[in-house]
Image: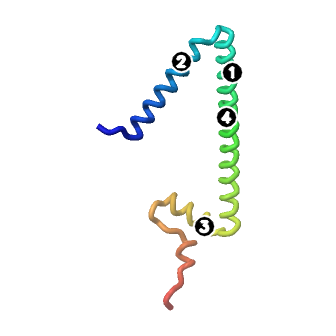
Amino acid sequence: MSVNNKHLATFLLGAAAAFGAYKYMNLTDEEKEKLANDIKDKANKVKKTAMDAEDQAMEYFNELKTKGSDALKEYMPKMEEFFEGLFKSGTKTTNAASTETPSNN
């Protein structure tokens, strides 16, 4: 039976966890409380950063949606009418799309 990378990683992870548990058991009560408070502070900072990033992402996508639709209206004014007709009527095409096609006359 050979030892592959997964077995080695599992062994090292187990050894690190055992060493951490040993170090934690040797801490005084004051050190344990300080460690717990430090972990809580770091977790709150990570949570705040994630919430700020979520708010920024929502603002960015709302701005992108508004600017994108404005650009579509500005540069391709008949496209808005085409998409409205396409999505409201299903497979029926609008006059804007049919007037753009060249005829064979």
Q: Which residue type does callout 4 highlight? A: Met
* Mark 4 surroundings: few (<14), some (14-19) or many (≥20) residues within 10 A: few
Mark 2 vs mark 4, CA separation in Å: 32 Å
Mark 4 vs mark 1, CA separation in Å: 20 Å
Residue of label 3: 79
Q: Position of residue 25 (x, y in %)?
A: 56, 12
Q: Nearer the viewer, residue 90 or 26?
A: 26
Q: Helix or strand or loop: what does disc 3 sit on?
A: helix
Residue of label 4: 51
Q: Residue at x 51, y 59 (%)?
A: 87
- 48 versus 79 height, above or below: above
Q: Are marks 1 and 3 in contact (CB under 8 Å)?
A: no
Mark 3 vs mark 2, CA separation in Å: 64 Å
Instruction: Give the residue at the far left of this rendering.
Output: 1
What is the quadrant of the N terminus in the image?
top left
Q: Are marks 2 and 4 in contact (CB under 8 Å)?
A: no
Mark 3 vs mark 4, CA separation in Å: 37 Å
Q: Which residue type does callout 3 highlight? A: Met
**Mark 3 or mark 4: whose residue is earlier in sequence:** 4
* Mark 2 surroundings: few (<14), some (14-19) or many (≥20) residues within 10 A: few
Residue of label 1: 38
Residue of label 2: 21
Q: Position of residue 58 (x, y in %)?
A: 66, 43
Locate residue 9 relative to residue 57 in the image: left or right: left
- Which of the two discs, 1 and 3, sits closer to the camera? 1
**Mark 1 or mark 3: whose residue is earlier in sequence:** 1
